[in-house]
Image (cartoon, helix red, strand yellow):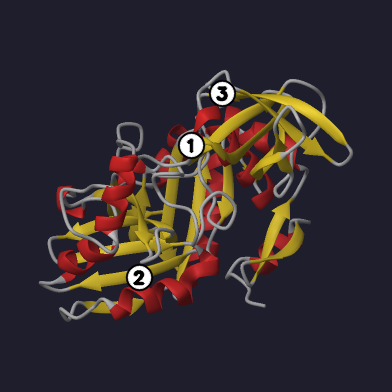
Amino acid sequence: MKNTALTETHIALGAKMVPFAGYNMPVSYEGVNIEHETVRNGVGVFDVSHMGEFSIKGPNALELIQKVTSNDASKLVDGKAQYSCLPNDKGGIVDDLIVYRKSEEEYLLVVNASNIEKDWNWISQFNTMGAEMSDLSEEYSLLAIQGPKAAEAMQSLTSVDLTNMKFYTFEVNEFAGVKDIIISATGYTGSGGFEIYCKNKDVKQVWDKVFEAGATYGIKPIGLAARDTLRLEMGYCLYGNDINDTTSPLEAGLGWITKFSKDFVNSEALAKQKEEGVSRKLVAFELDGKGIPRQGYDIVDADGSAIGEVTSGTMSPSLEKGIGLGYVPKSLSAAGSKVNIQIRKKVVPATVVKLPFYKG
């Protein structure tokens, strides 16, 4: 099992460590609800250094990215990032990712930890145009500093105007006394904040300075359990749960990152699917009764017949009710539709709702 450069720091802070995507990761420190509220109302820091980073460079870098990703990366300008996915050739998704444009001929792809090797191999097979590819995953650490107080708390560490950074933009600048850090106005919590990419050798200094600067703002370390409840309250897809090799981006509600203005892997089949319509859709639901929906639980109709399954579910700390995502027939996908969740031997009624669950 791999460690991040901060593993010893997490252990010293009393984190509960678990294996995640081949890494030894902090799942919680004080408890998921406390950590969740810290991010929703203040500022918290996640070590997400297990994520993968690929550099794509050269005159044909954009051509390769356009071929393998579903979104239109030609719309990017320097300092802009884009959410996208890697469609496979069978109608499913290899991974979801973020594409950063550093310059006309240099891009950074940030991929999920569990898919680093899979994604690398997938992209490589389409690199017939000779783009320069480097896997930087082992060299880089990534901190997600999230919450409504993040900009104010971190401003003393950089000359970049954090408050006025627009969502999905980034700058390469000095941060916490370290040069050439990527400061990115991204994150998977729905409460604002930044993601900080730095070399492994510098991350301890950055971590310490971040906690120093954030002390008066009540900054706390946050584990992966709260990251999951935070992203689920926003309805953000998690690879391996809500999207995978068998789910189409159109079924998953990711039509907005699937642009048919260009040719990409399997674009013809996905365009046909868009035209004909999908038979199932990923929906968000709230339980009408008591219970906690969990991944793998059946979604059943009035007769008790399985019509789908829960892909992600939890007890929402902000809403104090059971919430989840799952695939259901298209006829039951409109907001207000009634479904039932089989929770062990009990059938609990639920209502399909519009995302996000958490309105802020």
Mark 2 near mark 1, Cβ–Cβ under 8 Å? no
Q: Are marks 3 and 1 in contact (CB under 8 Å)?
A: no
Q: What residue type is labelled 1?
A: Ala
Number of other residues with Cα within 10 Å of mark 2, as a class: few under 14, some 14 to 19, many 20 or more: some
x then y, percent, for residue 294: 74, 44
* Relative vertical location of residue 51 with respect to residue 76 in this rendering, above or below: below
Q: Earlier in the sequence, mark 2 or mark 1?
A: 2
304 sits left or right of 199 in the view: right
Q: Give the residue pinned by disc 3.
A: 353
Residue 308 vertical placement versus 22 (above, below) = above
Secondary structure beneath label 3 = strand
In the picture shown, does residue 144 fall above or below 88? Answer: above
Quadrant including the N terminus = bottom right
Would residue 355 be found to the left or right of residue 38 on screen? left
Residue at the image point whose x is 28% and y is 49% from the top: 272
Q: Mark 2 points at which residue?
A: 54
| Residue 59 sits in quarter | bottom left
Give how far apart the Cα atoms at labels 2 and 1 are.
27 Å
What residue is shown at x 36% (from left), y 61% (from top)? 86
Residue pictured at 40% horizontal, 67% vertical: 53
Residue 106: image x %, image y %? 20, 66
- Residue indicated by mark 1: 150
Residue 237 x %, y %: 51, 46
Q: SS of the residue at dot 2?
A: strand
N-terminal label among 3 and 2: 2
144, 121: nearer the viewer: 121
